[in-house]
Amino acid sequence: MSEKNASLPSLKPRKRLIKTSANTNAHYGKAPGQRTVRELLNNGFINLDKPAGPSSHQVVAWVKEALEIEKAGHGGTLDPAVTGVLPVALGDAARALQVLLVAGKEYVALMKLHKQVDEKKIREACAGFVGKISQMPPLRSAVKRVRRTREVYYLEVLEIQGTEVLFRVGCEAGTYIRTLCVDIGKKLGCGAQLIELRRTRVGNITEESGVNLQDVKDAYLFWKEDGDDVELRKTILCMERLLEVVPKIIVRDSAIDALCHGANLAIPGVVEIDEMTTDEIAAVLSLKGEGVALVKMHIPSVQVIEKDTGICASLERVLMNKGTYPSIWKKT
C-alpha cells in the first residue's frame, strides 16, 4: 500500500458542536501558554529523540537527573536499539500519558529478507498486512505471549535494495514491528528480520520537533544559571499537547472542581463538544484550554447538545489539581 498522505485515525479532524456560551474567571486557572517554568517542570512533557543503546527507563532517569525533578514517565516503551520519538511526561503530566494508547504510532523500519525476492511480490505482500492483523508478541517482550489483534493503518514501501526493504508503517499502539517483519518474511516464503527501527510519530508528536538529551540539559542550565528560559520553553511543551489525539469537551468554570474531586461529567457543565460516539475517551478542557480530566462518553455528543440534564460521561482520570477552580458544587 502506497499512501503518501496516509494518516493515523487519531489525527482526523472532528466537527465541534456548540451547546452554549460562557465566560471564564481570570482569577482562577491559567492558560497553558502562560505557565511559569516551574509549572512546566511539573506539568509539561518533552518530545525526546531517544538514542540507540539505553532503555526507555534509563532515558527517563537521565531526564529527571538533568531537570532535577523527582517524577517523570514515558509514553510507549522503545527497545534499547530503537531510536526516535519518546514522549517523556514531567511530574503531574504523567496522568495524561494514557491518551497515547489510542494515538497510534508511526515507524520507519529496515527489513532484511533472507533471499532475493521479486519487487512486485514484496510490495504485494506488504500491502496484505494493512488492516486488522493477528500477532504473537516476541519471546523477549514484557507482555503475556497470547495471540492478539492489532491494526495497521498504512504500510508504504519506501525503497528496496537487494534483500533490504525500507518501509514506513502507521499502526495501533502495541503492534510489534519485529514480529511484522517476521510475518512478512513467512508470507514471502523466504524469511525476514528487522535490522533497524525508528519511531517517527506518536499521534501528533513527530520526530521533526524532537530534542536530544543534551538539548534538555543545556536548556535547563541556561535557565538555572542565567535565567534565560527561551530554549527551555521550546524543550518542555504543555501537557495539553498530549491531549490533541482525543476529542475535546469544553466545560464551564463551575463544573471543574467537581470533576477534580471525582464527579462524573454532567450535561449542564458542557459548553462545547467534539463529535464523537458512545464509549470514546475524551479530554475535558477549561475555557482557558487547561486539561481538566479524561472521561468516557455515556452518550453520543449529539445527545449532549439536545439534552439539558443528566450525566454524559464517566470520569477516567483527573488531570488538574483540586482547588485550581473554586468549589461551587454541592457535596453529598
Image (cartoon, rainbow, N blue to C red):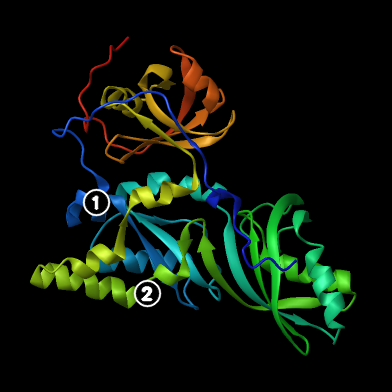
Residue type at mark 2?
Answer: Asn
Secondary structure found at label 2: loop
Question: Few, some or many C-alpha atoms within 10 Å of disc 1 (few <14, some 14-19, many ≥20)?
Answer: few
Q: Earlier in the sequence, mark 2 or mark 1?
A: 1
Q: Residues within 10 Å of mark 2 (few under 14, many from 20)?
A: some
Give coordinates of residue 51: x percent, y percent: 46, 76
Residue 135 lies left or right of residue 158; in this view the side is right
Up-down: is 284 above or below 67? Answer: above
Image mark for residue 212: 2
On screen, residue 299 versus residue 57, left or right, reads right
Q: Nearer the viewer, residue 285 or 307?
A: 307
- Position of residue 253 relative to residue 266, above or below, is below
User: Along the line of sight, which residue is nearer the eye, 321 or 268?
Assistant: 268
Quickly name the residue at label 1. 33
- Spatial CA span between label 2 and label 1: 23 Å
The answer to whether residue 259 is above or below residue 318 is above
In this picture, residue 163 sits left or right of residue 239: right
Q: Secondary structure at mark 1?
A: helix
What is the quadrant of residue 250 in the picture? top left
Mark 1: amino acid? Gly
